[in-house]
Every structure is written in C-alpha cells, then in structure tokens.
Image: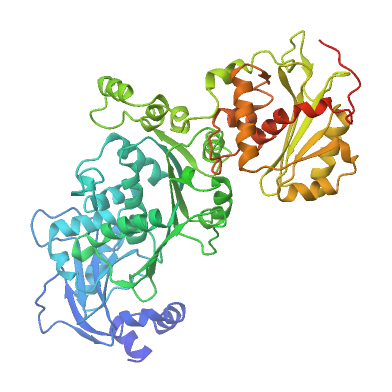
Amino acid sequence: MSYVGIERETGINESTIRRWVKRDPEWMLLVRGQGVLQVGPVKLQVDHNAPTFDDVGDESLAWVAPSLPASESAPDQRVLGSIAVENAEQLKVVLVPADRVQKVRDELAAGRIPYLPDAPTFPLRGDALPALTDPADVSLLCALASDDQAEAFRAFLSVWRFRAQETKDIRTLGDELWEAQDIFIEQMCANPHVYLLKARKLGQSTIAVAYAAFALRVRDTNARVHLFSRAERAALELLAAFKFGLDNLPTWLRLPMERETQREIVYSAGIHDMRHVISYPTSDATAVEATATHSHIDEWADMPRPDVVYQSLEPTFSAPGCTSLICTTGSGPANPSAAYFKDCLNGEGLHLPLFIPATARPGRDETWLAQKRRQMRVNAFRTEYALSWMDAIAGTAEYEFESEDIDRCTQYCRYRSDGHRLAVPFGQPLEKHRYITAVDVGVKDATVILTLDVTTDVFEVANLERYVGLSYPLIQAHIMEAHRKFNGPTVIESNAMGLAVIQNLNLPEHEVIPFNTNQTSKARIIEGLAARIANNELQYDPHLCEQLDTELRGYVFPDDNIVQDCCMALMIACDQAHQTYSKQGRILGVIMV
C-alpha cells in the first residue's frame, strides 16, 4: 500500500507516516500485514468478516489496559483487542496507558491497528493467546506488568516453583513467604545493588535465584543475567535451579528456548529481544567482558581470594542501569567479604548492606534457639543462626588463635596513642632497644612492613605499615626507611617477587634476612605465634593495628580465602626475633624500661 493509500485509510498525514517509518521501520508491520483483527476481548473463533491485512509477519498482537478494574467473570474487559497471526512464534502484548484506552478502542472499532510506539509491551509465546480469555491469567499478566517492581516480583513468585532443599518436594514460592523473605524482597526491589549477609535456612537464596529469573523473564528487555558461584559444580547447580523455575512457569508465560549449552541458555522474546543466562565458576583469574543487566554472586565469602574476584567482577555489574546482588554467609572477620560489608555500612561501598536475623522465620523463638545452642559448637551456632551482622561475619571455622587470648595481648603495649605515662608514640623507636622488621611483599595484594620491639620476652608491635598497589621502587623505599629507623635486621619473605625486592635493596647483605615460606616453615611460624599469644608474650594497640587485630581473630588454616598479610609479617618477625642477637647485627646495647 502506498503512503497516499495509508493516509486515505487512516486519516494520518503522509509526512507523519514517512517520519514514523524513518524512525522505526517495523512500524509498517502495524499497517501492512496478514492477520485477523479482533475488537474487544479475545475470541478464539474469529468472525470471517473481520478486517484483514497483508504481511504482518510472525507476531500476533494484543492490547491490554492494566489500569482498568478486573472483571469478575469472563470475558475480561481489560483486553481491548487482538490480532492473531496464524503460526505466529510471538505474541506481543501492548500495555495501554489509562489516557490512551479510549483512543485504542476507537482505532480498533474503526478497523485500524492502534500505534503506540512508547507504550510498554510484554512478550508471550505465539500460542499464548488463549490465556487472555481467562480473567485470572489476565490479572497475573497485569500484575507482572506493574510499575511497582515489588508488586511485579511478588506476582512472579506466585507462579515460581522450586525444589525444597530439605524435603525435595516441589513448592510454589509465593504461597507462603516468611518475614525474612518479605524484608529481602522489599529491599532488593527498591535498591539496584544489595549485599545480603545471611544466616542459614531463611529461604533467601531461593528468593535470590527467583529474582534473577524475574530480571530475565519480566524486568529486562534483551536481558543478560550472570550467575557467579565458587566452583564449577555450584555454578551448574545454580543454573539448574534457575532453569527449573522457568521451565515450570505456566505454559503461556514460558519463553521459547533458542539455545542451550552447559553454562548458557538463550530464550527468545522476539526478533530483537534475546535473553541470556550464563553461569560462571570463579577464581582469582575470573574476568567477564560483557556487561550484565543483573549479576548474582552466590556465596562470595567462599570464593578463592574474594577481594580479587570482586575487583574482576565489579565492572560487569556497576554499569548504569544494571543491578547486582551479593548473597553470602560469613567466613570470618579476616575474609574480605567482612571488610566490604563494613565499608557498605559506612557508605563506602556500592551495595546496600542487608542483614536479616535468624529469628525472621516462623517457629524460631527463644526456646528453639536455646535448643540449637546446646546442640552446636559456639562458632557454628553464632554464624549459622546469627542474630546480628557481627555474628554473621564471625564464620564457623575453628580459629588458630583464641579470642580471649588475643584480648590479653591488647592491654599493655607501650606503643600506644592514649597518653598513658608509659606510652611511646607509635612508629618511633626507643634508644638502644632491640627491634626486628618483617616484610610481606605484595603487588596486587598488600605489602606489610611490621616492626617488633623484642627487647624483653614480651614482644610489642612498634610500627605497622600496610600499602596496596605500590610499585617495586616505592616498596623498596619504604623498607629502607623502616630499616633505617629501627635498630635491628629486616626479614623479607623471599617467595616470588620478594626475592627481586631483596636483590635491589641498597642495604648491607648481613642486615637483610631472606625468609622462604613453605609448608614446613609455615606450620612452624603459626605454631610459634599461637604459643606466644596463648602465653601473653605479645602486645599491640588494637586501635593502631586494627587490620592486624582483625586478621588474628579470623585466622584459619588453610588461609587461601582470607586476608593474612599482617599475620604473615607478625609470624615471620616472631620466628626470626633471635636474629637480633646475631654478632653481625647492629645491636649496640639494651636499656630496660
């Protein structure tokens, strides 16, 4: 049909039509097509006298007005009309705003297809048209299309099915939500980036997976959902739970699957609307180039080197318009996940920090908690059924150093900042005291330079410097400054880059001690520090050495998933303290204070 013919049929000015076509070529599909136009509620058997059009393509159309009140009985008056195309693969539901309802009715009554380029749409599969004859299905569709994201997500949960972990039966998530889940839903829908530090068995992980599926199926056009987990098996299980829920939606809500691989599934929501979900196992080398519309990070604290993983993933979920969710249990105060939660509490992180106590589940009263407390180890109970975020980050592991022993190591250090009469300014040496400086070298990780006063049997932390991201020359400059200031040798961990640092220091060879960390030496230095702490033979100011205090209280072995650079420097210093008595050293004498 020519532009003149379209103007004659529709009453729309020819120049306007040309402008529309130039801006959106697909607009012609609304004017030229083959299909059956139905005015008013959907009828599966259409009047043969209804207007017909040529070349509509493979997409059916329906116009629904969510703002109109729900009908008590079929047909639902919110369905204003439809055009059904034989063998269509897609059904696009146009959600008609309240102020355009009458215009759409008038256009349909006149035998014209309404053109609403700015109206939101909801994609359905091509055979879903019968659902628009059911008032209950129309009500669900309108709820899913709500501008209130929490309302839309709750509607999605009313049809989201999952397999319960404890009983393995299949349930509908929205049938009965717990208080913990309600709080989680409200916060997740109101904030683009959420960090959930969770207690166990509150149903929050199930909600999190459902929300990721909601982002793909309902919220985002051309959605790209990334699922990150700590290992290959966990990542595949996360993807399987995601797929199970989508496969068990009502048939008319399911999207056709375009492609499936072990780690990726692609769903089709139209010619120009492909929706991807991809699962990733993580390591400290994880890097994802594509930006996600929603990223789900599961059990972040259990990932190897969580801080490095976060730095790798941050660009994928902090782009404008994207959302992300970190969902994890605590793994001890030395784990980077604990430090980041504190940063978020202080307003210094990207994410909203959210903790929900273990009691936010029906049946968990004081009697129940008391019984659980009797049945479990203290650390395990504190984290599994956390009542505060401090409990949640404590972790379930058995720590190498007892917290009560550490407390005694923070009471009498002379190198303080509190004005005590015996206090010595932190970082300033006492004349003729014995010191040893230990260095844990890092480039991607932190470099720590720790100095111990080893004049008496009770060692005291006299100085602590921690740097991140320094170049080798700057690291070497700081080491040489600490060595110049404090009377005694300097011990440097010689593994990897440490050896290069040692070789380029402008210091007498006998004043620099290489320390090789291996399985045997590490076991020795851990045992040595544990004995010193237990015997109250170590003192430090916890306010001036906050990072050291955190690491000591959360130190576990193996220590691959925790920050432990301050601990390593302290262990090495304690282990090599005898080197200050070497005849080759710079020790000039001792004055007892």
Residue, far top: 421
> In this view of the protein, which residue sits in the foreground, 523 or 154?
523
**Rendered position, 321 above or below 485:** below
Q: Seen in the image, is 265 located left or right of residue 160?
A: right
Residue 6's spot in the image, x, y percent? 33, 86
Name which residue lies at 14% across and 56% down: 136
**Rendered position, 5 above or below 493:** below
Residue 343's spot in the image, x, y percent? 56, 36
Question: How many numbered badges does the structure rendering display?
Answer: 0
Q: Seen in the image, is 77 located left or right of residue 555?
A: left
The quarter of the image holding the N terminus is bottom left
Residue, far bottom: 2
**Rendered position, 227 above or below 515:** below
> In this view of the protein, which residue sits in the foreground, 365 or 321?
365
Residue 418's spot in the image, x, y percent? 71, 14
The quarter of the image holding the C terminus is top right
Q: Seen in the image, is 380 located left or right of residue 416?
A: left
Name which residue lies at 36% across and 76% down: 271
> Is residue 67 in view?
no
Name which residue lies at 86% across and 16% down: 590
**Which picture quadrant has residue 245?**
bottom left
> In this view of the protein, which residue sits in the foreground, 502 or 425?
502
